[in-house]
Amino acid sequence: MKKIFIIFIALILPTLTMAAPDLTRTADFSILTTPHTGYRFQTLSFDSDDGQRHYRVYVGIPAKAAPATGFPVFYSLDGNALLEQLTPARLQWLYQQTDTPVIVLLGYANDLRLDTRLRSFDYTPPNPHTQHSSSDQRPLGGADAFLTLIQDQIQPAIGKLTDINPSQQTLYGHSYGGLFVLYTLFHQPQLFQHYVAADPSLWEQQGIILEEARQWQQQPPLLAPTTLWLMKSGRESPPPAQPLSEERQKYLLARQQSIRKLGSQATAQLNYDLSRHIPGLTTRYNVYAHDTHGSLLAEGFWDALSQPFTPQN
């Protein structure tokens, strides 16, 4: 039976749409001390209420006077991984724009680009039926606690560093981070005005976020003008370069089955449903035909950071 399973995995593994990233890679922190970028960086430290998770928040502040209304603020999850996307040339370009943003990258207090165990907990909704992942028993369901940390501690701390425009705040997330973006929109929509979810993991926990979306549509909140930008990768990821453990193979198979059950148009359908049923919410949906799930993390980040939201015709 085990031999049959291994043969089956070998046949379907190339079709799994999200190959595992290299989880041993460390983050590139060099931009934090690079001169002449038009930005100065500060690093803030925070801890979870239970003391189990520790965060570094990297804050890029434009080295110029704030506009009368204050700087817009761009928050992004997976901050350790995305530091490398802030090249000197990109920061200098942002500095020259009239709507130069404060950049807030939410990361963890270690040197990993992606800490899968911590992000799996922080970015996923609570679910009484699913408290651990099926691969390596990573805990899930900590989105409420992380959202409280952002609201009660991180956002007030950013407001003390420089003049910000509290009515122009964006939250970006990819994969599990995109799931957290949607969870924030559904539960605390007033915290940000612009939400960007790149390849959100709609399949996670049997599609619980889609059930929350349906409930949100049935009892729409009174929203101030709010935008949601949904991004979808268009290419399959290549198979992993290194052999995977049997447990990891089982996890990828289970995940792929969940994705197939939702259907390839789940993100597009979510965009359509929310655009029709939520007054005050303007949505946009883009397919990134040349990006895989993994590459969309960086591509979506820069697009969301550098391009103002515009609804599709």
Image (tube, helix red, strand yellow):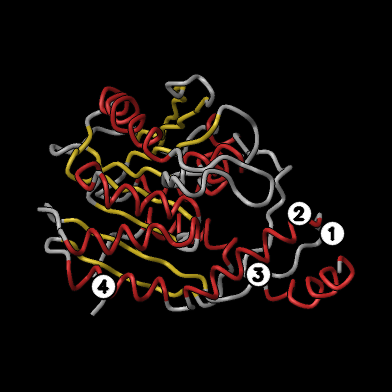
Disc assigned to residue 66: none
User: Cα distance, mark 4 to mark 2?
Assistant: 36 Å
* Amino acid type, residue under disc 4 in the picture: Asp
The image shows residue 164, relative to residue 43, as above or below, that is: below
Disc assigned to residue 273: 4
User: Cα distance, mark 3 to mark 1?
Assistant: 15 Å
Earlier residue among tags 4 and 3: 3
Earlier residue among tags 3 and 2: 3
User: Cα distance, mark 1 to mark 4?
Assistant: 40 Å
Q: Secondary structure at mark 3?
A: loop
Answer with the quarter of the image where residue 202 lies.
bottom left
Q: Secondary structure at mark 4?
A: helix
Name the residue tied to disc 3: 237
- For the residue pair 136 and 86, the one nearer the viewer reads as 136
Dot 1, how many residues are within 10 Å of its Cα: few (below 14), some (14-19), or many (20+)?
A: few
Disc assigned to residue 243: 1
**CB under 8 Å between discs 3 and 1:** no
> In the rendered view, does 210 fall on the left or right side of 250?
left
State how many labels appear: 4
* Amino acid type, residue under disc 2 in the picture: Glu
* Amino acid type, residue under disc 3 in the picture: Ser
Question: How far across and down, in percent of the image, does residue 91 sit?
Answer: 44, 45
Earlier residue among tags 1 and 4: 1
Q: Secondary structure at mark 1?
A: loop
* Amino acid type, residue under disc 1 in the picture: Pro
Of tags 4 and 2, the one toward the viewer is 2
Name the residue tied to disc 2: 247
Answer with the quarter of the image where residue 46 lies.
top left
Question: How far across and down, in percent of the image, does residue 223 sit?
Answer: 13, 53
User: Cα distance, mark 3 to mark 2?
Assistant: 20 Å
